Amino acid sequence: MSSKPIDTRLRLDGWWRFIAFGCAFAVAAIAFITWMSLQFGGETLTNAVDDVGEAVAAGVAAISCGLAGARAQGRLRRAWILLAMSAGAWCAGQIVWSVAEVGYGITPVSPALPDIGFLAAIPLAIAGIMTFASTARGTSTGLRLWLDRGIVSLSLLYVAWELGLGDVFTGSGTQLMTNLVLVAYPAGDILIGTALLLAVRRATDETQGRLLLLLGGLAANALADSAFVYANVTGPYIYVLDSGWVVGYLMLALAAFWPSAQSDRTTEQKPIDIWQLTLPWLTVLAGGVTAVVVAAVQGRQMDVFATVLAGAVIVLLMASQVMAHRDALSMLIRSRLSAATLNEVIVHAPLGMVQIAQDLTIIEVNPSFCSMIGASAGGVIGAPIGQFFPPEEMALVGEKLQALAGHVVESIEIETQGARGDGSIIWLHWTATAVGKSSGDLDYFLVMFENVSERRSTEDSLKAAYAELEGLVAQRTAELRTANERLSTEAVSDPLTGLYNRRYLADFIERELSRTRRAGHKIVFAMIDIDHFKRVNDTFGHEAGDDVLRTLSAFLRAQIRHEDLAFRYGGEEFLLVLPCATFDGVPSRIEQIRERITHVTIEHLHRPLPAITLSIGVAIFPDHGDTADAVIRCADAALYLAKEAGRDRVVYHARKPSPDPVMTAAR
């Protein structure tokens, strides 16, 4: 009997086992989510089920991964054991958490003992994922692979920081160590996600399903981690968010039952994938979009940490590009070893490649260059290279090639405009090196051309769009600043008179009282009321009354010093707050206000109104009270006495606090 039917039967049994466990785990996950959503038995019981359920799910994942490791061989064994240790560490942390919270009614606060298990699970999970990866493909090897990992992880960290992770770290109001522990969870999840994304593309077709389950499970864990940290900082917390851990670890447990070989299968190295090249750039694009959105919508700039992250990404991108160019130049230099090999490279290279003699005539070209300039090989070979480039561009190229021929530099890179056969203009990127004879003299120049017209057009469009966006952002920022200033002024000013309102009085006065108390000085409170103001409204109308209020407000601003403040207290009542070292000179100033207002002309609709008089009640801090409210009540009581005594007068509250104010009138 052959082994093939046995292998097929084993694979079928493996699929049935996978489906059975998948259904069981799905039912358990749905039941947990339902309980968390509806909170059967109340919050206390739900909290207990929540804690225990998470520990059980992590324990199931640890056992399943451990059994898979026992069945596997080689690298797969190490991978499953590392994942089992990761799930076990998290389970241990959750057990400690559950005992404290459910058993003793104490909710641990980070940093705490459970954090040891939770944080230990992160590096173990990353090590397990990286162990799963099979033979590298394309350029995903060595330093280039680590650069891609760094670009992806730092870009994702930048996006997470700008969209809320920064608020978690800086806005929780807790100690630095607590902040570091809280941020370690989403940061670790970003590293796990980066390792998984790069591991899935390196997997064989047979193991991609297993890694996708791991990706989904760890993604669910990452969502729960981030939600837990952010919700605990901003509140309120929702129990159903904890379902991410249960679902995630059940998916990890299910991945252990994925039907596949139990030993390593080394695959042949495959050509590079297009998305492998674009993955780092897509994450960088996400970071750029995030920066633009945050600046345009929220109107805030990057903080120091976000700036460091952006700088690190730029450095890694530059290093990646330097390595790419180094590889290209290395290919050109190695091509000197054989003219035949060089010709093959020239003919089959996807970029335009040209051999140029010392007199700058073309020796050989490849089809790509002919396609770029829209000419045939027969019309190009033997022609001067300057025939296809403007004279001003060739002057710069000649200087560069002269330095190359003189061994001043080993290679040159330059971008110039080129003229096609149909008269159209294109942009070409030159990468040139000098090929020497055995004697050391120059034999010819080897130049690689890349058509960068589309890139240059895109860059020009992006520059114009950026300039336009910058202008819009600046305009919007100015509008917002103006609106904020207007709102700030309106919030503390009376719209009719322009004087400060009672809201600003409440914000200002306690600080002023504290300063005055420390300095041992005094503050005079003068409560002012317009005599017979109702008669003005009834006789001439409310608009005339508004003109009276505006005229009095302007008069008061002109009479007080820059350190004094005038408030519209309500209706026709005004309040002057006059800080002073001593009371000397204050009575004469207040009397001048009362006397001078009778000579002020008030107009309404270009017609004069009758002159007004003022009744003024005066009290002093701290002589008549320890609080602003107490002193203002004394000033108001004195104002009442002034009106009772016949109006048009100043009444001072008694020098010492007493149940009833004593009238000291000035007329």
Image: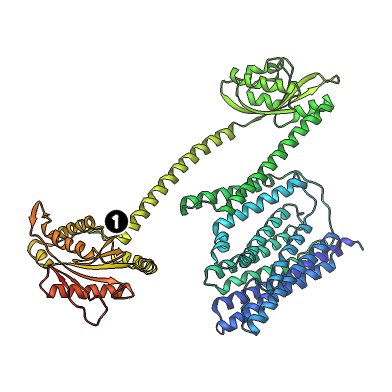
Residue extending furthest toward the right: 1
Looking at the image, which is closer to me, 569 or 171?
A: 569
Q: Is residue 20 visible?
A: no
Which quadrant does the C terminus fall into? bottom left
Looking at the image, which is closer to me, 203 or 418?
A: 418
Image position, residue 279 (x, y; %): 66, 48
Q: Which residue is mark 1?
A: 562
Judge from the rendering whether residue 399 lies leftward or rightward of residue 589; answer left or right: right
Image position, residue 642 (x, y; %): 15, 72
Vertical arrangement, residue 160 with respect to residue 58, above or below: above
Q: Is residue 662 visible?
A: yes
Q: Amino acid at mark 1?
A: His
Which residue is pictured at 82% across the width and 63% down the height? 78
Judge from the rendering whether residue 375 lies leftward or rightward of residue 516; answer left or right: right
Looking at the image, which is closer to me, 160 or 561?
A: 561
Res 538 → quadrant: bottom left
Looking at the image, which is closer to me, 375 or 493?
A: 493
Judge from the rendering whether residue 91 lies leftward or rightward of residue 268; answer left or right: left
Res 259 → quadrant: bottom right
Which residue is pictured at 85% across the width and 19% down the height? 439
Vertical arrangement, residue 488 with respect to residue 45, above or below: above
Vertical arrangement, residue 309 with respect to residue 413, above or below: below
Crowdedness of circle 1 by 10 Å Cα count: few (<14), some, many (20+)?
few
Which residue is pictured at 78% across the width and 49% down the height? 136
Image position, residue 185 (x, y; %): 65, 64
